[in-house]
Amino acid sequence: MPEGHTLHRLALDLTDAFAGRPVRVGSPQGRFADSAALIDGQTVLGAQAWGKHLFVEFTGERYVHIHLGLYGKLAIGTYDAADGPPAPVGQVRLRLVGPPEPAPRYADLRGATACDLWTRGQRDACVARLGPDPLRDDADPDRAWSRISRSRGPIGGLLMNQEVLAGVGNVYRAEVLFRHRIDPMRPGNTLRRAQWQAIWDDLVVLMHDGLAKNRIDTVRPEHTPEAMGRDPRRDDHGGEVYVYRRAGQPCHVCGRAIRTAELQARNLFWCPGCQRVYRPRTSLRTP
Ligand SMILES: [Zn+2]
């Protein structure tokens, strides 16, 4: 599943391709056809992401809401102004086509979990249910802290809960917990406020870096392949990481084998050396 930086990148690219222009809206596959007809030819004002939700705003306070889910893809391309956009390939739920001037751009959405035409009220209600998004300047980390500090659930699960924190997926949650040496199973309400602030500040930096480079790199300068004289990581997610999808491989910091387990139906990765099991002080008492 794409992480938040991917949705913010798409929002920037959609804005760049279509904002301020009248856009033809269609649904070659048909599932979005009735809604598409309502906004076909209207002007796109821009696109924004909140966590993993993407909104393309049209005039008249109408929003196309997109959630890619596990398999969705939104591809933005350039068409030949003389020939027009290419014939749709596969199940294209939504197609946007901009005018040939100043640049002939189109976008195809396939396989998304959600593609709906919403009012402003529906958009606002969706956003209100989401936790703060580290990639948004208007985000308030205290809203996430109020949930985390009251929860007995594991911090590894809380970071992935989009109502607690929006945009963080499996890679960033595993990596940020490693970077702060926190046991993913540690209950949220045992974290100290300063630990949460450090996690948040780190996510803001890491996710902005991911947005700028369009890949997730989380290792510190002393742990890059060049610094350590090791081979770069080979993985379709790209990027250099400490624990994500490195089960059984040696930790770049302590050398112990990275571990994996399932938590809330997603694979969790951590280092048993760097992220020691959290034991509350009360359990140290002898009976
Ligand atoms: Zn380690």
Image: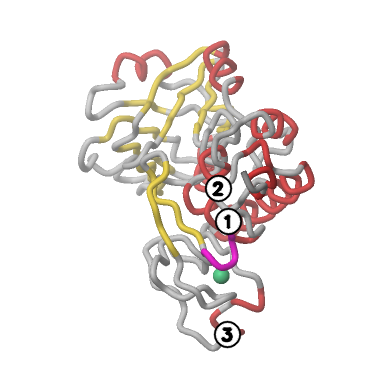
Q: Can residue 274 be seen in this view?
A: yes
Q: Do the residues labelled 1 and 2 touch (CB within 8 Å)?
A: yes
- At label 1, which amino acid type do we have? Gly
Nearest the viewer among 59 and 67 is: 67
Q: Which residue does the numbered mark 2 point to in the structure image?
A: 5
Nearest the viewer among 269 and 133 is: 269
> Which region is colored magenta?
272-277
Q: Do the residues labelled 3 and 2 touch (CB within 8 Å)?
A: no
Residue 228 marker: 3
User: Which quarter of the figure is the C terminus placed in?
Assistant: top right
For the residues carrying marks 3 and 1, which lies nearer the camera in this image?
3
Q: Which residue does the numbered mark 1 point to in the structure image?
A: 210
The residue at 66%/78% (across/down) is 222
Q: What element carries label 3?
A: helix
Quadrant hosting ligand 1: bottom right
Nearest the viewer among 37 and 201 is: 201
In magenta segment, residue 199: no
